[in-house]
Image (cartoon, rainbow, N blue to C red):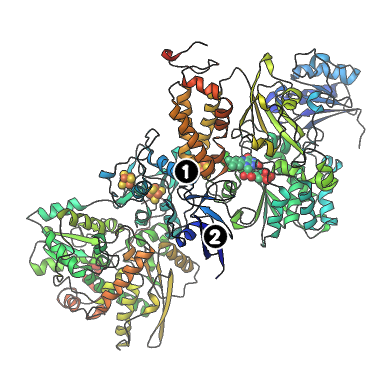
Amino acid sequence: METVRVTIDGQEVEVPSGSTILEAARIAGVDIPTLCYHPDLDVKAMCRVCVVEVVGARTLQAACTQPVSEGMIVKTSSPLAREARRMNVELILSNHPQDCLNCIRNQKCELQTLAEKLGIREQRFERRSRTKNNLDISSPSLVRDMEKCILCRRCVAVCQQVQGVSALGPINRGIDTIVAPVGGCELNSVACTLCGQCVHVCPVGAIYEKDDTQKVWSALADPTKHVVVQTAPAIRVAIGEEMGLEPGALVTGKLVAVLRRLGFDKVFDTDFSADLTIMEEGHELIHRLQNGGTLPMITSCSPGWIKFIEHFYPELLDHLSTCKSPQQMFGALAKTYYAQKAGIDPKDIFVVSIMPCTAKKFECGREEMTDSGYPDVDVVLTTRELGRMLREAGINFATLPEEEFDAPLGISTGAGVIFGATGGVMEAALRTVYEVVTGKELPSVDFTEVRGLEGIKEATIDLDGQKVKVAVAHGLANAKKILELIKEGKADYQFIEVMSCPGGCIGGGGQPIPTNKEVIKKRLAAIYDADKGMKLRKSHENPAVKALYEEFLGKPLGEKSHHLLHTHYVKRGKYKI
Amino acid sequence: MAFYRAHVLVCGGTPCELGGCRAVKDTLLEEVNRLGLSSEIRVLETGCLGPCDQGPVIIVYPEGIMYARLQPGDVKEIVEQHLLKGRVVNRLVYHEKKEEAKSVVTFESSDYFGLQERIVLRNCGRINPESIEEYIAHDGYRALGKCLTEMEPAAVVQVVKDSGLRGRGGAGFPTGLKWSFTAKTDSNQKYIVCNADEGEPGTFKDRLILEGDPHSIIEGMAIAGYAVGANKGYIYIRGEYKLSIERLQHAIRQARELGLLGTNIFGSDFAFDIEVRSGAGAYVCGEETALIESIEGSRGEPRYKPPFPGVSGIWGKPTVVNNVETLANIAPIILNGAAWFRGFGTEKCPGTKVFTMTGDINNEGLIEVPMGITLRQIVYGVGGGIPGGLGFKMAQTGGTSGGCLPKEFLDLPMDYDTLAEAGSALGSGALLIMDDSHCIVDIVRCFMKFFKHESCGKCTPCREGTTRLYELVTKITEGKATNEDIALLTELSRVMQTSALCGLGQAAPNPLVTCLKYFEEEFGAHLNGYCPTGVCTMPVANVKVG
Ligand SMILES: Cc1cc2nc3c(=O)[nH]c(=O)nc-3n(C[C@H](O)[C@H](O)[C@H](O)COP(=O)(O)O)c2cc1C
Ligand code: SF4
Ligand code: SF4
Ligand code: SF4
């Protein structure tokens, strides 16, 4: 590796050539403060907080972007650099509500942390407000509060570069600049997938999930309601983090325990319906393969992804599996199969989902999602909202014992758990499809080619002579690449898994803050640990799923399944919901 | 070619056109026809002749007599008296607005033109800008031919380097050096961009060059293309410049027809073509990286540099961005050589500079003078002094973002380096003269309003800072400011100058900073509740007498 020698605050260091001043300074042990910079994004040099003095340069340089060169002498805290850094933060603060106590990001806010780090104690400019009509609550998932926006444009970058959606952009100029959905419309009137990735990158409290905790508190307090909860695969590797444990802590048993403490009547697991999804989707794939159905077939469990294809590629909707997502399959069964079994009137059953995802709030409100005769799922809470409830209830997460999910909708396999990670649905499907088609037992259940954080992954499986080529994409910009291939007739895959969020659900828009590549890697490892720790690791071996077919559904793709577990899609087009 | 006894040039620049030169030209043609003079007298429309506040203007050759402020009704007299009988119509002759006795002025001998040196404006007002033949007859496209048939690209770059030509778009970056970066960068595609955005208030030199001599820009761009290995050019031009756009498009068509654009130019294997793109009109779009964003179809906002456009510009390809005036210098440099060019101007800034003089000055308009001429020579020589017997208060050089220089600087040579030392800039050559009836704080307030409006909003110090500068300066004009406000203004200015992303935010505080320095007393008076010129209304309780 080529290196250059630079002097940072009097200390000479050797750093890889091409490093930015920021990276070089870290090697020299100096953490230059930043604000708009984000390690996973290409956002550059806009906030002017990381400016440093480079000897010989006409102006200060943005450390996050300026590459080092041989012999460069950098002063990160020279009087000019300090003055500019402090005043730029002061300028931002004086155009910011500074409403920390009421703010959703209090104590998790990068602006607050920065101001504290720099010890900013006064603003000498008159306070002003960036915008009057600041609150956009039009969507079922996200709230945008543009008065708090500091115009770092990370949300614009993630939406365009990572998600390929470009729903957001700057409008107006100068002091009137704001970041807004295309054309200055409300979020709900543009082609936004509600994936919530913008929440993760937003340094402040300007974008956040719509809080539905009050609905859950009310249901729990209502003696006429039988309140059941399902937890998505990705929650068990994230809620610990939300409660102050290390990222990647696997806390399945504690999660069950805290939900019981909160007062849920039954604590179930979306992993159960994930296994069920594999049964339905796996058979759908086999059916399409054997009967000349539309191929490649694409998974349908990620609601942001569904909204994306409905907006941008409505002509390709036939490629989607007709399976509902595991959350919605669960809801439909909770108010039919489970209601029957437990002898409870479905109108009294209240289904709460704990999801890593903001788009799930939208999904549960889709009009197709009432096949039980009621809204299949009543309320979706994100991981962060559950954390909020637990903190308010004062539940001591760390000292609780581990508990087991309730039967029957809490019984699952390792195949259900890995739904939480990119490649997981594919791997779970392959475990089942292989054994169903070939009638043989898999030598190893680990399909490692489809694991990991590569944007697009491919694999080929031999089903007794029939070669099946599969692809996995996460992050909608990657999905877009595959859809373009399909459009051009160049996609030679039979089966494709798409998850909206980078890393899959573990990186979902409802997960703890911060969620970034570093953290995602740790959650990913935890998911596969959870899979390994399961006695059963193939969906078709799930005894509760088997019983469900015997007692209620009949067979995969049968009449009842068709009615309760499958759905259809809407051609939305780009600029209308 | 028919032989004409006389040529009448009618100024067709935009200001004159607004003043009614079309009607003047039409009447002229009518009158010439009526008197049967059409085979002897040729009426031509040309680009701007300079003294724009005097339009419509015509010049009668061979005498070079200039008539100004013409109405269609005046034309009959000129045709009957001057063109038919050879008697100059004194009543209508152009007079410099000096207090002295009125005298007949010929185009070349007036002070207005006498101090001037025309390289860039060599053809403006002399040829019909819509005729490629006339451009060619005045040595047009000879330089391109010379490059393509006699010179290696590297030699072309070298001549431009040796000439010492510096970019006329504002920063004064050496043009040859800029070209050499792009020439050195390997790429299958490179671009030449002519920056004709000209968003600076009070500046219209580029427009008049384009209107008066569009082929000089096409030729300059083609030479640049050959020198650096680019075969595609864009002219990024303000949308409002309708006439320039028309003339450019016409000129490009003509050049294509004659094979001076396209493939195998001059029988060589060099190919070059040009596309005209009109801009959205924001000031910041003149900044080269914002301009590139705009050409690519994005919001016109500056990019972080490096990479510089010369290495990575349009669509990430190496791109030379040059100002109109810079490009207009190229052909003469190639034809006459670097040494010839160095014969004008100063050692570090050879050549001439086109200035647009506006404000309290007798001869408002366009001038081309050698670099290094003093402010006094411009104001009191070419400019004809300040009207109404008022005193000189300050000159702002370099446009709205330039510094304001008081009379102590009248003998300052006008070039990039001395002006930068004085806290100002040569910039694009806008020159705003103010007489002593103006309040300096109020003037600064207007400048700050401009930047508040023009900030693109991308980076913090400029987006927030321009508004804060305006608020605080307004506070001074209202007599409500304190010493702390001045300290805050000073600090904020420094932070913007050192940390804004692009030149707009970096330069926005310049007029304020120079005025705080050079007009300290006047600011002080405002802090004490008193506006010396009486322009600002102060709270009554604070008014101090005299
Ligand atoms: C805010 C701003 C506005 C500018 N506007 C113009 C302009 O209108 N025309 C121009 O030629 N250069 C303008 N420039 C300078 C260009 O960025 C660039 O330096 C120039 O076009 C290079 O050409 P030159 O080397 O021939 O001077 C502007 C710069 C800034 C920062
Ligand atoms: S966004 Fe941050 S700084 Fe702003 S009010 Fe919220 S917590 Fe405070
Ligand atoms: S909403 Fe958040 S992420 Fe988007 S620009 Fe504003 S502060 Fe940045
Ligand atoms: S300095 Fe001003 S114009 Fe330039 S990038 Fe920053 S906000 Fe935009």
Amino acid at circle 2: Val
Tell whether label 2 touches label 1 (CB within 8 Å).
no
Residue located at (21% from left, 58% from top): A386
- Quadrant in the picture for the N terminus of chain A: bottom right
Q: Position of residue A550 (x, y in %)?
A: 16, 78
Asked whether mark 1 and ligand 4 are closer than 8 Å, the reply comes as: no
Describe the element under mark 1 as helix, strand or loop: helix
Residue that label 1 marks: A84
Q: Which mark is residue A6?
A: 2
Q: Does residue A557 appear in this view?
A: no
Measured in 3D between alpha carbons, the distance from the residue under mark 1 to the one under mark 2, in whole angstroms, is: 23 Å
Q: Position of residue A564 (x, y in %)?
A: 22, 66
Q: Is residue A482 left or right of residue A18?
A: left
Q: Is residue A59 left or right of residue A112?
A: right
Quadrant for residue A102, please give it: top left
Q: Position of residue B497 (x, y in %)?
A: 54, 40
Question: To which chain does the residue with label 1 belong?
Answer: A
Q: Does residue A290 appear in this view?
A: yes
Question: To which chain does the residue with label 2 belong?
Answer: A
Describe the element under mark 2 as helix, strand or loop: strand
Residue located at (68% from left, 56% from top): B182
Q: Same chain for the residues at labels 1 and 2, yes or no?
A: yes
| Camera-nearest residue between A515 and A79 | A79
Q: As displayed, is residue B528 above or below residue A141?
A: above
